[in-house]
Amino acid sequence: MRARIFVRLKRGILDPQGVAVKRALEGLGYGEVRDLRVGKVLELELEPADPGQVRSRLEDMCRRLLANPVTEDFTVEIVDEGGRPRLP
Amino acid sequence: MRARIFVRLKRGILDPQGVAVKRALEGLGYGEVRDLRVGKVLELELEPADPGQVRSRLEDMCRRLLANPVTEDFTVEIVDEGGRPRLP
Amino acid sequence: MTEAEPKVTLDLARAHGLTAEEYDRIIRILGREPTFTELGLFSALWSEHCAYKHSKVFLRRLPTRAPHVLQGPGENAGIVDLGGGLALVLKMESHNHPSFIEPFQGAATGVGGILRDIFTMGARPIATLDSLRFGDPADPKTRYLIGGVVSGISWYNNCFGVPNVGGEVVFAPEYQGNPLVNVMCVGLVRQDRIFRARAEGVGNPVFYVGAKTGRDGIHGATMASAVFEEGAEERRPTVQVGDPFTEKLLLEACLEAMATGGVVGIQDMGAAGLACCSAEMPARAGTGMEVDLTRVPRRETGMTPYEIMLSESQERMLLVVARGREEEVRKIFAKWELEAVEIGRVTDDGALRVTMEGRLVAEVPVRALTEDAPVYDKPTARPGWLDALEAFDPLCLPEPSDYERSLLEILAAPSVASKQWVYRQYDHQVGINTLVLPGSDAAVLRIKGTAKAIALTTDGNGRYVFLDPYQGGALAVAEAARNLACSGARPLAVTDCLNFGSPERPEILWQFAEAIRGIADACRLLEIPVVSGNVSFYNETQGQAILPTPVIGMAGLLEDAGWRTTQWFKNEGDRIALIGPEAVSLGGSEYLGVIHGRLAGRLATLDLRLERDVQSACRGAIEAGLVSSAHDVAEGGVAVALAEACVSGPGEIGAEVALPSAGRADLTLFGEGASRIVVSIPAKAQRHFEGLMQEWGAPWRFIGTVGGDRFTLKVGGSVVVSLSLDQIAHAWRTGFERYVS
Amino acid sequence: MRFGVVIFPGTWSDCDFHYVIGEVLRQPVKYVWHRDTDLSELDCVILPGGFSYGDYLRAGAIAGRSPVVEALPEFVARGGFVLGSCNGFQILCEAKLLPGALLRNECLQYRCQSTFLLVENAETPFTRGLRPGQVLKMPISHGEGKYYADPESLRALTARNQIVFRYCTEAGEVTKAANPNGSLENVAGIVNEGGTVLGLMPHPERAAEAALGSTDGLLLLHSLIGVLVEDGSFLKR
Ligand SMILES: Nc1ncnc2c1ncn2[C@@H]1O[C@H](COP(=O)(O)OP(=O)(O)O)[C@@H](O)[C@H]1O
Ligand SMILES: [Mg+2]
């Protein structure tokens, strides 16, 4: 069973990395980028289990360790073998 | 128009951060995690344009700056407003 | 004045941390109710953090003048003369509350803030030091905090490119809910290039430079002045995020702009952001200021005037530029890819006038925000609990059955053990000035282009101050100066960071007042001016205050960099001498804490004249070229000082020492007292050394010899400790790491 | 030999290199701004340590696409030397002037400490004053210094003797314990095929004066400018 977890800075929190990368892209001629934010993605391979339960365990992991509640939001996706998200 | 770009270490390259996070999760009682890898996700807001063209511009950006071909793979996703990937 | 803003009431003022009396005072000053934005300005500038309302009357007792002081307290940082047209800028700040809420960003932005305080004076930062306090090392929360704080400091320091050359890490349960993160920075400036935070020159344009403004840290200043309660975690969204890269660009751009002569005054937007700068800069110059918030670069949409004025977004500065030089200044910031926007001008009417989209949102006399801020002389009271603590006699406790084990336990105590795990994460060499790296009593940095060097240290012992605030305060100064003496330096100046509980409690305020009295007396006798500092009150959780912790940052001068001396033994056959008095106490000692789990007793009496003579004697011997190593005897007593001298250097070397008995062996070995230094000298220098000691009138005695691969201690003729260097080194090297990795 | 020390936004070892070249070695040296592309006045370009562009995205990534770096291939083609230390090494790899990449330290922490380097190749212009097997003492200071190259590239590097320095013990043993960042095969520094572009994670400029603990870093610069070092064991260029 596979899942991915996105951890990103909360809206409104400065993302200096995003700003620097956006500016670098502009310098390379990619002016079409209006906004860019950099986050983390964790790709997990899990023991097979009931998807609903897996989702709630993953959310627990995020709250307890993977995301910093002060500065970050997270989303959890259970994905199929091709890497496409399954609907909840 | 929105897109996201995943940049991850190539398979075969040790991901010490992934190892450390996996171990920490085990310590917290999440033994169901068989494998975990940490990557980057860049979320972009772009000028509206033809999706096919956008995709190829994004792939260019990856090749020229966003991913290091020696160590990293990338995938590009054009997403709808809800954040769900549109099919190519 | 604006429809959208909430109506200001007493309740709203209270929610902003203002008292009813203070609110009345505002109405009296303005002759009307304040607008919402004005309320924000008053609440920020009248907060404890900005106004020092509870501490001002006590701080006046500190000696701040000396012929070499070029700038005392009152500016962003203090400045002392180094000779040859150079000056040293120094300042220390706390970032305790933010670091508890978000350790990584809290500590990182703490570094960012203190760096700006230094380069806003026109100086290039040349070193930082960090003084840290945490709770129980075995608690997972502590590990999380240390990990976050150290990596935050490491990230900001290293990315910015300033060496971190020293500091402290101390553990005590009293810091569990309220860790301390104090960072000191020193910078170097040419005396003709010193800048001040003054808005001089009516009509001069005011420039906003650096990062864009977001909703970061709004209310940070008031938050830092509020006692922590259960549920404090909910205040989290106010945490600021640092960008050391932008700060580095800001440093280069500011110094370049200052060098053109086009900059009149400059201040960093730190606590209370634009509000603080736009009030303090004209207040210092006796002018006024007009600011149009419409022009302030923003990161977010829909920000209100209140939010823009109070935002604590990092990496921003306010500049007053000489009229006619705008283009020059703008170009320099553009070169460094930074925003520089004219947002206002200096006026002559003493008012701060803030507009947004053509509307006037605040109009306040700047003096009202600064000089007219309330000052309190609140009651102090000696806490009753001290009687029982003082009455406790440590010698009523059983003597350890195994002194070797006790010594190893103390060496492995995380407050005593090696802090290499911390400082190897900090760049401590960038700038290629660091002659003595972290790991000795004080760091030493050369001053390029001269023969001179400076020595830097931070010191403070909350246990001592808790048991005896007056002596504890004085001891912190004495120890810092002693650390400098051991490295061969003569103290130049103090910057302090005074971390205490709530000043609204008479016992806490008494601790504060007494500690300051101690600091002041020590500084006066040792002739070291206090040139800058910071007060951090309200360090408590649920009514539980931290140990009162004044941290003393001190800078010293070595006229000849060649005098620099390190703490570790170097040569087989060197004689070991102990300079200083015999009198020690187990009261408040590390031994009592580690072995017996107690914090009680009386401290050994500090004799400041003796302290001065011991330091002079040590420095005299160093300057005469007689000393191979010098190490301050501090926490853990002489046994620990000697053991450290054996294993803290690049190579390990043993020692054989015989101490006269001072009563029980635990008192002799682990007793703590001021004014003591362990030195090693080549045998052939012995005569000369004896003569010098005589001259300085410092008590001293030879106690042993360097050499071999064992550490042996005799007390009153019998061997009480005989350990291999491996055993000692292992205990001391792994004691801290075992908790953090 | 005329040196140019490049400044990117976020570079911090620029002044240190400038000082060592100008004040210690007394060689002509100037700063080069990252937008400059005219390197015709220079014989050696130094890419110093620091956090160019904050090291955001990947260390050296953004600087690796800057105008001055884009001008380097031509500079090298006409015989110029390039020395990249720390962030400079990362930039050279990102710009593909050197093979491989530098990953986050395996310990996941920044490391500032003294290291020992085993000289593997004493034939390059930067090392001809050294002996193969010689051990140098030089500090490191980085968070992303773990050298990585795919097996094939690594084989090629080894075959062509492009690995110049490996982390070792004081006695010259290449051990795991002596490897501060998890670098593949303890690689600390490599050169391009021509031997004229050197990248290394350690800081030679911090090991250029006895007062700072080592002068071994000077040996690299001495080799380059052709001053006799050691006991005259190599010939002046
Ligand atoms: N404990 C202290 N001892 C001496 N000077 C102090 C102390 N606390 C504050 N000061 C001085 O008061 C002034 C205001 O301090 P502070 O508000 O901390 O500065 P900033 O606005 O940069 O944070 C500074 O010049 C500072 O050096
Ligand atoms: Mg400040």
Image (cartoon, coloured by chain):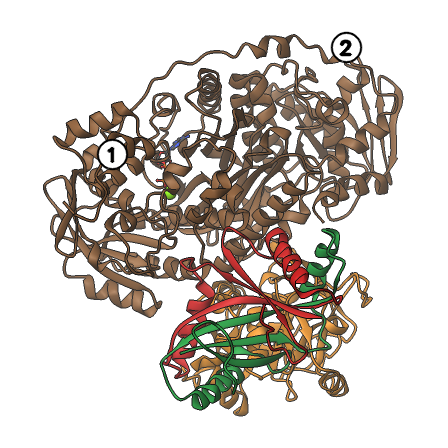
Chain colours: A red, B green, C brown, D orange
| Residue occupied by mark 2 | C396
Q: Secondary structure at mark 1?
A: loop
* Farthest left residue in view: C349
| Residue C395 at x, y percent in the picture | 76, 12
Q: Chain of mark 1?
A: C
In the picture, residue C136 is in which quadrant? top right
Rendered view: C450 above or below C170: below
Which residue is at a point 47% across and 17% down the rendered structure image? Answer: C514
| Residue C65 at x, y percent in the picture | 35, 28
Determine whether, in the image, residue D82 is placed left or right of residue C598. left
Amino acid on which disc 2 is placed? Cys
Alpha-carbon distance for marks 2 and 1? 54 Å
Residue placed most toward the observer, B54 or C462: B54
Indicate if the residue with disc 1 has its beta carbon within 8 Å of ligand 1.
no
The picture quadrant for ligand 1 comes to top left
Rendered view: C503 above or below C215: above
Q: Split into 4 quadrants, where in the image is the C terminus of chain D?
A: bottom right
| Residue C72 at x, y percent in the picture | 35, 34
Q: Secondary structure at mark 2?
A: helix
Determine whether, in the image, residue B79 is placed left or right of residue C293. right
Label annotation for residue C370: 1
Residue placed most toward the observer, C103 or C625: C103
Label annotation for residue C221: none
Amino acid on which disc 1 is placed? Thr
**So how many labels did they put on this image?**
2
Rendered view: D62 above or below D177: below
Q: Chain of mark 2?
A: C
In the picture, residue C64 is in which quadrant? top left
